[in-house]
Image: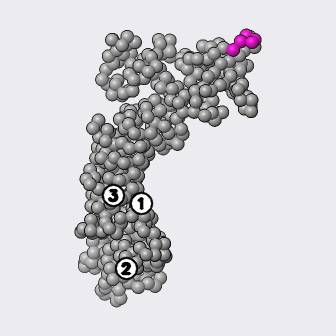
Amino acid sequence: MTQQMPEDAVGRRVFCDGERGTVRYVGTVPPTTGLWLGVEWDNPDRGKHDGSHEGVCYFTCRHPTGGSFVRPKKVSFGVNFLTAVKLRYELCLDEALGEEVKISTKTVKMVGFESIMEKQSNNRLSITSSPSSLSHAFSRLRVLTLNNCSITWSQVLDCAPMWPNIEELFLNDNSITELQRPTDVLQGLKVLDLSNNSLVQESVPQISNLSRLEVLNLSSTGMSSIQFSDCCSSILRSEFIYLFLFLFCSQWAVISELEKLKSLVQLSCLRNPLMDLEKNRETTHQLLIACISQLKIVNRCEVLQEERRGAELDYCKKYGRAWLQAGGHRDPEKNHPSAEFLAEHPRYLTLIQKYGAPEEDELKEQKPFALKDQLLTVTFECPEDTDRKPIQKKLPSSMMVQKVKGLLYRLLKLPGTELHLSYTSSKIEGKEVEIHNDLKSLQFYSIEDGDRILVRWS
C-alpha cells in the first residue's frame, strides 16, 4: 500500500496483515538499504526481537520478542488523535459541522467532537504535557471510547482535564489495575466501563466520589469480592446505578455488600459463577431480590412488587433456622443474633420486622418424596378476564404459594400488581377457598389433582 510517510511517524499506530503496533523507529538498518520502520506489536507473537539487530539496539520493547522491522509501504498509518484535533480548527469545522474530512486513509465525520472516539480504540496514545490547555478543543465531548489502548487509570486521570464535560467513558481491556480517587475531574461522568481490566478490588471504592455515576461495568475484572465503607456508599448516589457485575465469588456476603449502595436499582450478573451456587437459577434470582432491597431490575427482568414480597418471605424461611441457631428469637427482647450472622444476612432483622418471624412448622425440612406421586394437575383460570384461556400445569403438592405466584407472573404476563388466589374443587361444589398465606404449600390448602386455581389481581 502506497502512502506518504508522516513526519511524526515515531509513536504513530500502524496496521499490517491484521496486526496492530506502534512505530518506535524510522531509519536505515545496515547492512540493508532503504527505509525501515521499527514496530512494537501489540501481539508479541507477531514480533521477532526486542528492537535490536546484529548487536545494535534501534528501539526497545516491553516484550523480548515484541518488535520487528517492516517496510513503510506494507503498513497503514492510523489517525493521529491530536492531529485530528488540530485539523478541526485549521479547517474551521466550527463553521461547517458535519462536513466530511479526509484524514489518512479514513473518512471521518466530525460533528463538534460530541462522540468521536470510536476510532481511537486499539491505539497507543501519548499524553500531552499540559492536558488542561486542550480543554477548549473538547468542550463538547460527551462520549469517549478508549478500548484496548494499554492505558492505566493514572493516565486517564492525567488526560481527564482535557474532557471537562465527559459523560460516558469506555475503558474496556486496558492496563487498569489500581484505581485512584478522581479529584476535580470526571465529576460529570454517568457511564464508566472498566470491564476486562485486572482491578485491585480494594481500590474500587476510590471512585465513590463520582456522584453522578449511573452505569458501572465491572464485568470480567477478576475480583472475588467487593467492599464499600459506610461513608463511601452514602456518597455513591444518583437517580440510579446500573452495575454489571462479574465477580468470581462463592459467597452471598458479596451480594449483601451491595445493599449498602442505596441507589443501586439495576444489577446484571448473568455470567457470574454465583448464579450456579443454588440448585436452580430461579432460586438464585429470588435470593438476589431479597438481598438487595432497592433493586428494580435483575438480570434484565423487572422485579414486580408481588415477586419481591415472595422472595423476601422465602428468604426469611430459608435462613430462619440459622437465625435461631445464631441467637435469634421470636421474642424481640430476646432476639440477639450473632454479629457473624448479621454480617452475612444484613437484611434479615429488617425482613422479620416487616413480615414477622417464620413459624416453627415453616422451618421443618421437607422429607424426600417421589415426585411422580406428588404432582397435581391444576388449571389456572382468570374469572375476571375471559379473554385469557385456562392454563393447565402439573405442580408438586409441596410447592409454596409464593412460587406459584412467581410462575403465574411469567405464564400470564400480568402487570405488576398484587395477586389474589383462590381455588375450587369438585368435592366442595359452589365454594371458593381463599389462598392467603404465601409461605404455605398447595398441600396445606388440600389442593388436589384436577382442582381449579382462580387468579385475580388488583
Task: Looking at the picture, tell me which residue is in the foreground, 385 or 413.
Answer: 385
Q: Is residue 252 left or right of residue 393?
A: left
320 relative to 184 in the view: left or right: right
Could you tell me which residue is drawn at 37 percent across and 76 percent down? 89
Amino acid tagged 3: Ser
Q: Tell me, yes or no, whether the two marked residues, 2 and 1, touch with CB atoms within 8 Å.
A: no
Q: Which mark is residue 90?
A: 2
Residue under the point 54% across and 28% down: 306
Bounds of the magenta segment: 428-432
Percent position (x, y) of residue 424? 71, 16
Q: Residue 430 in magenta?
A: yes
In the image, residue 441 above or below residue 135: above
Helix, strand or loop under label 3: loop
| Mark found first going from the N terminus, 2 or 1 | 2
Reading the image, the residue beneath label 1 is: 143
Name the main secondary structure of what is drawn in magenta.
Answer: loop
